[in-house]
Image: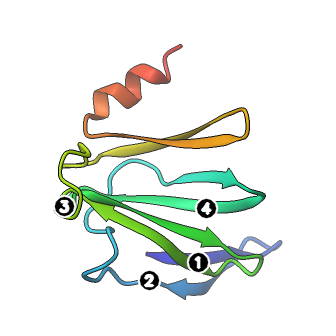
């Protein structure tokens, strides 16, 4: 996964390269990444279809990503992350929730309304 900075003139420069490993859940992600805000901080939520999991990165002011949380179905069976396809965040009151689905049709359906 590459983090690129977009300059005012439209050029891109690399800020960071993150390579999937045994801890991160980045293998073969589909759909869009999700940005969520919690406690005044912004987080990037990334899902790995083949890893059957989700990785969370805090986004720094300089664009650098710091891994804060990783979970997959092998570590926590029953989470329903097998083949996770997409994520979405929603804030209710002061609590931020991340929703995950393994079915692309649910994502399409949710955006129709």
Q: Earlier in the sequence, mark 3 or mark 2?
A: 2
For marks 1 and 4, give the CA distance: 9 Å
For marks 1 and 2, give the CA distance: 9 Å
Disc 2: which residue: 18
**In the rendered structure, are the residues bearing label 1 and label 4 in contact, judged by CB atoms less than 8 Å apart?**
no
**In the rendered structure, are the residues bearing label 4 and label 2 in contact, judged by CB atoms less than 8 Å apart?**
no
**In the rendered structure, are the residues bearing label 3 and label 4 in contact, judged by CB atoms less than 8 Å apart?**
no
Residue 11, given in percent of the width and then of the height, sits at: 70, 77
SS at circle 2: loop
Residue 71, given in percent of the width and then of the height, sits at: 33, 63
Q: Which mark is residue 88?
A: none
Residue depicted at x 74% and y 81%: 62
Q: Which mark is residue 50?
A: 3
Disc 4: which residue: 43
27 or 76, nearer to the observer: 76
**Residue 40 in the figure: left or right of residue 31:** right
25 or 18, nearer to the observer: 25
For marks 3 and 2, give the CA distance: 17 Å
Q: Quadrant of residue 10?
A: bottom right
Q: Quadrant of residue 29?
A: bottom left
Q: Earlier in the sequence, mark 3 or mark 4?
A: 4
44 or 97, nearer to the observer: 97
SS at circle 1: strand
**In the rendered structure, are the residues bearing label 1 and label 2 in contact, judged by CB atoms less than 8 Å apart?**
yes
- Determine crowd level at label 2: few under 14, some 14-19, many 20+ residues with C-alpha closer than 10 A: few
> Which is more foreground, mark 3 or mark 4?
4
Tell me if residue 92 comes above or below residue 24 in the rendering. Answer: above
- Determine crowd level at label 1: few under 14, some 14-19, many 20+ residues with C-alpha closer than 10 A: some
Q: Earlier in the sequence, mark 1 or mark 3?
A: 3
**In the rendered structure, are the residues bearing label 3 and label 2 in contact, judged by CB atoms less than 8 Å apart?**
no
Disc 1: which residue: 65
């Amino acid at each position: 996964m590459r983090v690129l900075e977009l300059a005012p003139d439209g050029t891109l420069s690399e800020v960071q390269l993150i390579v999937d490993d045994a801890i991160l859940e980045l293998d073969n992600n589909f759909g869009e990444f999700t940005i969520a805000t919690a406690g005044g901080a912004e987080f990037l939520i990334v899902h790995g279809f083949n890893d059957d999991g989700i990785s969370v990165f805090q986004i720094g002011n300089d664009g650098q990503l710091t891994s804060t949380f990783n979970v997959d179905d092998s570590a926590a069976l029953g989470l329903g992350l097998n083949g996770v396809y997409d994520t979405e965040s929603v804030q209710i009151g002061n609590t931020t929730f991340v929703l995950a689905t393994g079915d692309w049709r649910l994502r399409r359906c949710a955006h129709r309304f």
